[in-house]
Amino acid sequence: MKMSAQSAAGRCIEQFFPDCHVAFLAGSSVRKELTEHSDLDIVIIDETQSSSYLHCLHFCDWDMELFVFNRASLSFFFDICRIEGLPTIPHMCVEGTIIRDDGSAEEIRNEAENYLQDGPAPINKEKENYLRYTITDLLNDLDSSISNQEKVFTANKLFDLVTEYTLKVNGQWLGHGKWMYRSLRNFDASFSERILETYNILIKNGESKPFITMIDEVLAPHGGRLFEGYKNFI
């Protein structure tokens, strides 16, 4: 029988990071969402490590992703997460099960929680204009007489960019893959369902107007499409 996630994580720490100070087991195992393809996400704080890194391995019949830090590099990475708008590591520390603790795990968890509550760094005007310009360029392509195959690729890029833009201009955390959808749904469930619906209409029958209309509605409060006068150094 396969070893439990927590037991496997604990054995991994004992074998590969015996001097580890704090470790959190996070991800789908903690949320009770394990599937046959799930891996174990473990955040490790070990002062014997001189830098932060990701190490992937197969151990005790589990695929594992080990996110290794020392205390200083963890705090620095929290700052990077805030700048990039991606809260993966702070989220792991907050939601994770403590599997090693030298007495500082709750302090780390509280620090991570403060980062999540403070939210991501506000989007600057240069980045916002760049996104608006890029979305405008793709919208113009979608408005043109391009093939259905080209529409699919154009719409796919637009879907990602509009989701990112919506979350960023509203001060929300981003995410990768399923976490992007979860972030959007948590921010505005109605909007997330509508953009999915209009995107699916385009993919299924090539009808792009509802998707384009919705994106224009997203841009409208921020000045609409951006082309004339846009300037950026390349």
Image (cartoon, rainbow, N blue to C red):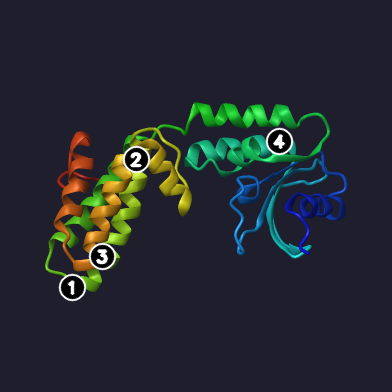
Type of the residue with mark 1: Ser
SS at badge 4: helix
Pointer 1: what residue?
A: 147
Could you tell me how far apart the alpha carbons at marks 1 and 3 are, in whole angstroms? 12 Å
SS at badge 2: helix
Could you tell me how far apart the alpha carbons at marks 4 and 2 are, in whole angstroms? 37 Å
Give the mark toward the camera: 1 or 3.
Answer: 3
Give the mark toward the camera: 4 or 2.
Answer: 2
Let me know if residue 69 appears in the view: yes
Pointer 2: what residue?
A: 189
Give the mark toward the camera: 3 or 4.
Answer: 3
Type of the residue with mark 2: Ala
Query: At which x and y percent is residue 70?
Result: 74, 41
Give the mark toward the camera: 2 or 1.
Answer: 2
SS at badge 1: loop
The quarter of the displayed image where residue 16 is located: bottom right
Q: Residue at (43%, 42%) from the top-left corner?
A: 183
SS at badge 3: helix
Type of the residue with mark 4: Ala
Looking at marks 1 and 4 on the same chain, the residue that comes earlier in the sequence is marked by 4
The quarter of the displayed image where residue 45 is located: top right
Let me know if residue 176 appears in the view: no
Could you tell me how far apart the alpha carbons at marks 2 and 3 are, in whole angstroms? 21 Å
The quarter of the displayed image where residue 159 is located: bottom left
Q: Front-most of 200 and 58? A: 200
Pointer 4: what residue?
A: 72
Type of the residue with mark 3: Ile
Viewed as shown, does residue 158 lie left or right of 172? left
Query: At which x and y percent is residue 208?
Result: 17, 60
